[in-house]
Image (cartoon, grey):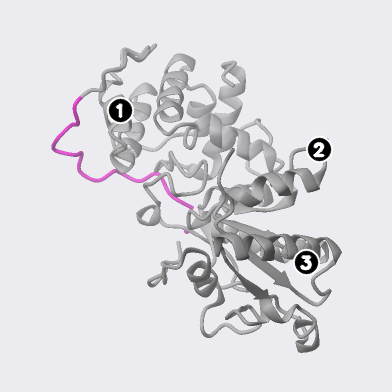
Amino acid sequence: MEQFDVFLCHNSQEKAQVEEIRTQLLQTGIYAWLDKYDFEPFRPWQDQLDEIIFQIKAAAVFIGSSGVGPWADIEMKEFLVEFAKRKIRMGLVILPGCPDHLINEVPRFMRSFQWVDFRHQDPDPMERLIWGITGIKPGTQTIIHPPVFERPSKPPETTPKPPHQTDDLSSEKGIDYTKLRDLLAAKNWKEADEETYRVMIQAVGKEEGDYFTNDELLNFPCTDLRTIDRLWVKYSNGHFGFSVQKEIYLSVGGKADGKYYEKVWEKFGDRVGWRVKRNFFVVSNWINYSDVIYDTASPRGHLPAGRSGIGFSVSSLASRLVNCNTP
């Protein structure tokens, strides 16, 4: 069973605000449990709560203008019992608009913990929430705008040793994917991202430093696209890859037609960590390529980030993956 860093206990009336916070936590690599996404369909919720409560390291009890709520009250009591057994980290998170009298209705035991208050921006409530969940005080966070396929930095001078496994490195264009495979196997995500650009620009017959056109991505060689994607998915254990991005893009309303849909693109950027916001009420910003997170602690689908027309490439590559019969 997947282990979560924090359980987000909340009133369903406040779900939109809690989802915003969950997205920010995921972007920092904190796995946050939320019923909307993590309850298995067709199973009693109480049974599932009993199962996952042992997998949770911390519990954040949200309270807003609607109070704690009946279901959240049950969850909170479950976690109070678990706190007594395991001393899990837990505390209140006050949402904007919550009146003081509702806080006073929370059990005294819960109010005894230092809480996080999103009604105030100083100190930064998101940093305090991360601190409360992890026990580690965050340093200064960088506001991380869309990545633009620019010319990659100088290639790495050394190449890691090849892995022992034998991979299918097929190419319609005679391209050698050994280096990409070796970089991915060694978890050198940044260098692998840059190498991905190099082999892809080569596959469409262009020179390093050039940009992709929409048509080039819509007609990218199927064999090569499958090889690149398969390597990313395999060596990241399903965390990275074009097919992973396709799945996320379609899940937020995207269409595999190679066209640009602004709202969908923004939702996709939020999900994969290409758009973030530092404070709860600040508009999201697209990250710079220099701010890409080269670690599997990043949100799922964060890589490949690429450097060439990424604003349309996900839709275009999603379309090509469908046409190439790639899952």
- Specify the segment rendered in magenta: 145-161
Q: Position of residue 200 (x, y in %)?
A: 38, 28
Instruction: Name the residue located 79 percent from the left edge and 71 percent from the top edge.
Output: 68
Please name whichever residue, 235 or 260, is drawn nearer the observer in this view of the structure: 235
Q: Is residue 109 above or below residue 266?
A: below
Residue labelled with disc 3: 14
Q: CA distance from mark 3 to mark 2?
A: 24 Å
**Mark 1 or mark 3: which comes first in sequence?**
3
Q: Is residue 207 visible?
A: no
Q: Position of residue 73 (x, y in %)?
A: 79, 66
Please name whichever residue, 168 or 220, is drawn nearer the observer in this view of the structure: 168
Locate the N terminus and report the quarter of the image it occupies.
Answer: top right
Residue 318: in magenta span? no
Residue labelled with disc 2: 43
Label 2: state its secondary structure.
loop
Q: Position of residue 325 (x, y in %)?
A: 59, 16
